[in-house]
Amino acid sequence: MPTVLHEERVNAPLGKVQLFRGGAGAPLVYLHSAGGEGAGLPVLEDLADDFEVIAPIFPGFGESEGIEEIDGMDDAVFHLLDLWQELGLVAPAVLGTSLGGWMALELATRYPERVSRMVLVNPVGIYLPDAPIAELFGRSPAELAEMLFVDQQHPIAAAMHAMEEFTGDVGKEVEIPIELVLPMWKALGATARLGWDPYLHDPKLRGRLRRITAPTLVVAGARDGLVPLAHAETYAAEIPDATLAVVEDAAHWLPLEQPAKLAKLTRGFISSV
Amino acid sequence: MRFFSFHLMPYIGLDPAYDGPAWVTCPNSLFDPRHGGELYNRYLDELLYAEELGFDGVCVNEHHQNAYGLMPSPNLMASILARQTTRAKVAVVGNALPLYDPPTRVAEEFALIDCLSGGRLIAGMVVGGGPEYYSFSVNPAYARERFQEAHDLILKAWTTPGPFEWVGKHYRIRYVNPWPRPVQQPHPEIWIPGAGSVETMEFVAKHHYAYMGIPYFHLDVFKRTFQMFRDACSAEGYEADPLQAGWLVPIYVAETDAQARREYEEHLWYFVKRLLPGITIQPPGYTSARSLANILKSAGTFMLNVTDWDEIVAGRYAIVGSPDTVTEQLTEALSQLGTGNLLGLFQIGSLPGDLTRRNLELFAHEVKPRLAAEFPEGSPVFRPTVAAA
């Protein structure tokens, strides 16, 4: 029986933060991907049966303010610490997807004591010369859908295919209402602030993985078209207390495509340690 | 009216088997260095010829890693032109400021060109095209911020005695003290090219600079753009001078309309179909939400979407015809746009040297004098009612 999450606003030092919260139990913070997902996510409603799920939207995404003050992962980490403070969180469990997984890693390497458990889904954040992360920027929604989903009939994938023409290319005629493309436009702009150069990684992060103390589960979509499996394997090997779970029939946006499997893995992992 | 001859210096002879974009990822194995050297020399000669024919100035611009325009450093070209011309303005339109780190490099090189030319430089400053942010990996989310700060630094370097220290968000320089300094005081004339970003227009209006409309859109887009620019000047409390605006447009003149089209059309399509693809990519964070709406409004009319000659003519994507036709169409368009600078692209796509030179000659002898009489310098250009009559 899924628990509905309610939308709230929290005042953080950088501005108002839009967040979704529901359920009761130990706190579990969800950090979203470059897609800015949060509202009505089935995986979170599922987990809210057992946890107090809190899904803050990062500045520059959705309706959260303050991206002008975020110039890199340093600022992102301080923003998370500020949020922990506002929400009265000491060391919550964190579930992070892709960009959100990277933020969780930056927090857990710098302030290991502020994260109790970590579930990372297809995280970005390191550079592997033999397994580079594919190009995220400058893609049409249809191309992105191919990387993010196994099943192109998934409602979100199908909606992205419907926006096929839109790349933000000023030379292409598109018949798409601006209201539909603006959220994606904003989300990619905010992502660029953090991950344009170096491209979706922090050169220092890999050497710092040894500092993480939280038991960590790395979840990889077997058919991720953006981040090669070698990344999940590297995190699992180099984070001191980490295990790897590979989900078949999942690509990069695993939380959207396999919500039940991710909820089960997360629940099992957090209650086992 | 001031008349400029603008050159993109395109790559002619792109492998017909290649059908990808001309930008960012267009393989540089397709560039033949000896052929490239011939093109550079030919194109420089065409600009020198424009001065000889009485143009007020010549223009070069900056693009990287592409077949559309082969000037990664327009300042190299401008320094040659500064040395080999004697009278014409040398307009660099412009340097993509966010790509120069530190941007005092721009202050130095522009000042050098101004010295070399005896004060004939027009200093263009531009945010840089979308593809450039892929080619340089400079973060597009900071394009506007870096442009703004680099501009402030360059202007201060030109107008405040050095040395001074610069401590900004993007640039920190302990000793700013560029040698040489520009001849023109307090600084060279500044042009800013723009593609419809509201922020750019407001910036140009605020500083009383000149706004150059980036080409290849339907004439209606330029009408809207230059009206927005005049409005931005009004919002700053003054009326825009015609010399504060420039329209860049491909022009081709031959003896008759039929001959002009016959000689020109295939070379224009080479430009549209081979050199334009890839130019319009918008990296994330490069355009504000406010400007995205304005830019998307124009997107459908971008020349890449044009496949038919009649559309080229109707939208005034290029002004092509006999001296009478070209004069008439330019008079009408300029009256509607109100721009006091006409920047003609007299070479485009694969247009060969002999046709380019004859085009320049016919324009200089048969069109330019009539336009100059129609739009004397110092009098208003914007005359929508005249155009309608």
Image (tube, helix red, strand yellow):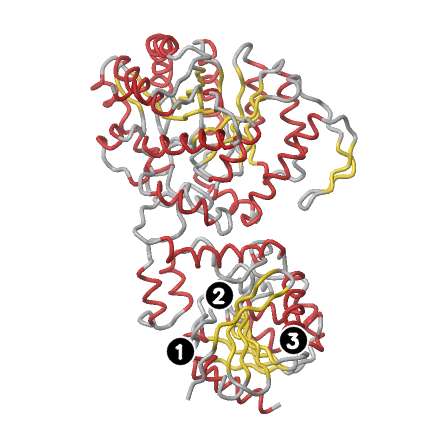
Of circles 3 and 2, the one toward us is 2
Residue of label 1:
A249
Left or right of B14? Residue A236 is right
Amino acid at dot 3: Glu
Whichever of labels 3 and 2 marks the residue nearer the N terminus, that label is 2
Extreme residue in the front direction: B237
Work out whether disc 3 and disc 2 sit on a shared chain. Answer: yes
Amino acid at dot 1: Asp
Amino acid at dot 2: Gly
Q: Chain of mark 3?
A: A
Extreme residue in the bottom direction: A272
Residue visible at 54% across and 55% down in the picture: A192
| Contact, mark 1 vs mark 2 (Cβ under 8 Å) | no
Residue of label 3:
A238
Total marks in image: 3
x and y percentages locating residue B39 in the rendered image: 45, 25
Residue of label 2:
A36
Which secondary structure, mark 1? loop
x and y percentages locating residue B25 in the rendered image: 45, 46
Quadrant in which the C terminus of chain A appears: bottom right
The residue lying toward the viewer, choosing from A244 and A60, is A60
The relative height of residue A119 versus residue B236 in the rendered view (above or below) is below
x and y percentages locating residue B34 in the rendered image: 48, 29
